[in-house]
């Protein structure tokens, strides 16, 4: 009996099971179709991580579907198809076979619309209240499912230049929060940088939206008009009552904080340097009418090396937080398959990937999870969005979590 252990605390008391729970020896504990009772024993079981049979997991079903597709293309007889079993060896905790409620793409679409409405009018009397409410809502959603949140935002950023400033603000906030968690910052400092990430382009959002839709690259006049937008944003924030000097400095200097070690900088200058690298990274992932979005690998290289082509401490912190191939980005595998990164791994270059296109170039019937720690499934290249000719439905991808 092939068993897979579920991650600790991945189930909840009262949940109606769509699969059976077992102990490490395979003995049945709770049958499918029954709710989990609220007892000390059950809570201890959920904290430890129960076991399920491999064939009840989504991973096994997708591996089997992929094998059947391959066998059919090879002209296998019906008798062989009927007796097929998946080539499946669990090497890490697999996604839950339940219908656990992941963050839906529609939620983030609503948050993007909310961000657009808030940031477009900073002189509303309730602007700061609405801004902090937006921050709290985004951080709460991010805390629930960080990889799913990043996947939605990275994928969404790469799709089209429409509403660039709101998309970029949300992605920058999430990248800032994940980077500063990686650095061990306190909650109050993380919130300050998060507010700066949301407001660094305040008063220039509409202008940046227009530039993103221009079919030509920015000329000298447009670049000059955008120059100093950090100063203008900081001035607006101070005018409406912001007196946090770290927030104001991060916004004012986010294009001017130069390279070099992070140690020895004032708090505002340190935040500005982090925000600068986050700004560059998110911009590389986003298309303009005048250029395509770059791959995550290209974006990572842009922030790993500083303006003097030396390893950048702030950029390294960002890459450590999100990985070389962040959730939502696209990758080529050693197997010849192409897919989307779903979850960060223990190493920056070994995430969990959902294969979407087979080695023949044909889209797979269903996504198949690939463990990139295995040499045969390792990532060989980061792909830009235009390099996979497939429309990806994020709601379906989020069900793999």
Image (spheres, helix red, strand yellow):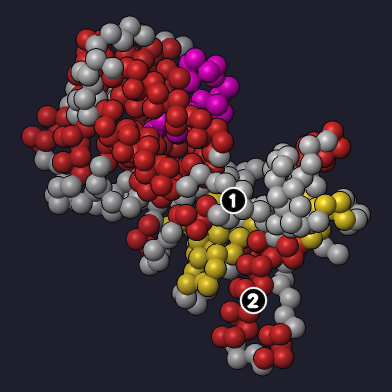
Residues under numbered marks 1 and 2 in contact, where contact means CB atoms less than 8 Å apart: no
Quadrant containing the N terminus is bottom right
- Kind of element beneath mark 2: helix
**Residue beneath label 2, please?**
67
In the displayed structure, does residue 34 sit left or right of residue 61? right
In the displayed structure, does residue 29 sit left or right of residue 56? right
Residue 41 disc label: none
**Residue beneath label 1, please?**
401
Magenta span contains residue 179: yes
Front residue of this view, candidates 144 and 174: 144
In the displayed structure, does residue 55 sit left or right of residue 224? right
**Mark found first going from the N terminus, 1 or 2:** 2
- Kind of element beneath mark 1: loop
Picture layout, residue 349 above or below residue 379: above
The residue segment tinted magenta is 172-190
Whether residue 299 appears in this view of the structure is: no
Task: Give the prevailing secondary structure in the magenta stretch.
Answer: helix
Picture layout, residue 233 above or below residue 337: above
Q: Position of residue 207 (x, y in %)?
A: 16, 34
For label 1, count other residues whose C-alpha is less than 10 Å away and answer few (under 14), some (14-19) or many (20+): many
Which residue appears at 43% of the width and 59% of the height? 393
Q: Which is closer to the viewer, label 1 or label 2?
A: 1
Whether residue 128 appears in this view of the structure is: yes
């Amino acid at each position: 009996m092939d068993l897979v252990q579920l991650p600790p605390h991945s189930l909840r008391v009262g949940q109606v099971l769509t699969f059976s729970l077992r102990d490490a020896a395979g003995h049945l504990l709770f049958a499918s179709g029954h709710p989990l009772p609220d007892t000390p024993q059950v809570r201890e079981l959920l904290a430890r991580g129960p076991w399920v049979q491999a064939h009840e997991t989504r991973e096994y079903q997708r591996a089997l579907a992929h094998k059947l597709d391959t066998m059919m293309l090879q002209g296998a007889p019906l008798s062989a198809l009927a007796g097929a079993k998946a080539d499946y060896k669990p090497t890490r905790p697999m996604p839950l076979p339940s219908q656990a409620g992941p963050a839906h793409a529609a939620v983030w679409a609503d948050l993007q619309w909310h961000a657009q409405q808030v940031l477009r009018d900073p002189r509303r009397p309730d602007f700061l209240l609405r801004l902090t409410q937006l921050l709290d809502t985004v951080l709460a959603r991010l805390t629930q499912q960080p990889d799913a949140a990043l996947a939605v935002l990275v994928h969404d950023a790469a799709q089209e230049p429409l509403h660039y400033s709101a998309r970029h603000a949300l992605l920058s906030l999430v990248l800032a929060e994940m980077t500063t968690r990686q650095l061990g910052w306190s909650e109050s400092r993380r919130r300050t940088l998060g507010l700066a990430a949301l407001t660094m382009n305040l008063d220039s959002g509409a202008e940046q939206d227009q530039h993103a839709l221009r079919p030509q690259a920015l000329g000298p006049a447009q670049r000059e008009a955008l120059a100093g937008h950090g100063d203008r944003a900081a001035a607006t924030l101070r005018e409406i009552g912001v007196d946090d000097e770290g927030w104001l400095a991060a916004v004012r200097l986010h294009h001017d904080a130069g390279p070099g070690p992070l140690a020895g900088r004032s708090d505002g200058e340190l935040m500005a340097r982090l925000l600068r690298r986050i700004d560059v990274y998110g911009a590389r992932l986003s298309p303009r009418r005048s250029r395509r979005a770059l791959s995550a690998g290209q974006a990572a290289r842009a922030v790993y090396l500083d303006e003097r082509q030396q390893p950048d401490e702030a950029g390294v912190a960002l890459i450590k937080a999100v990985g070389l191939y962040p959730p939502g980005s696209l990758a080529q595998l050693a197997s010849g398959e192409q897919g989307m990164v779903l979850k960060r791994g223990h190493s920056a270059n070994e995430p969990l990937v959902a294969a979407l296109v087979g080695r023949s170039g044909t889209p797979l019937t269903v996504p198949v999870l690939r463990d990139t720690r295995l040499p045969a499934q390792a990532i060989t290249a980061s792909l830009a969005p235009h390099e996979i000719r497939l429309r990806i439905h994020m709601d379906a991808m989020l069900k793999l979590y």
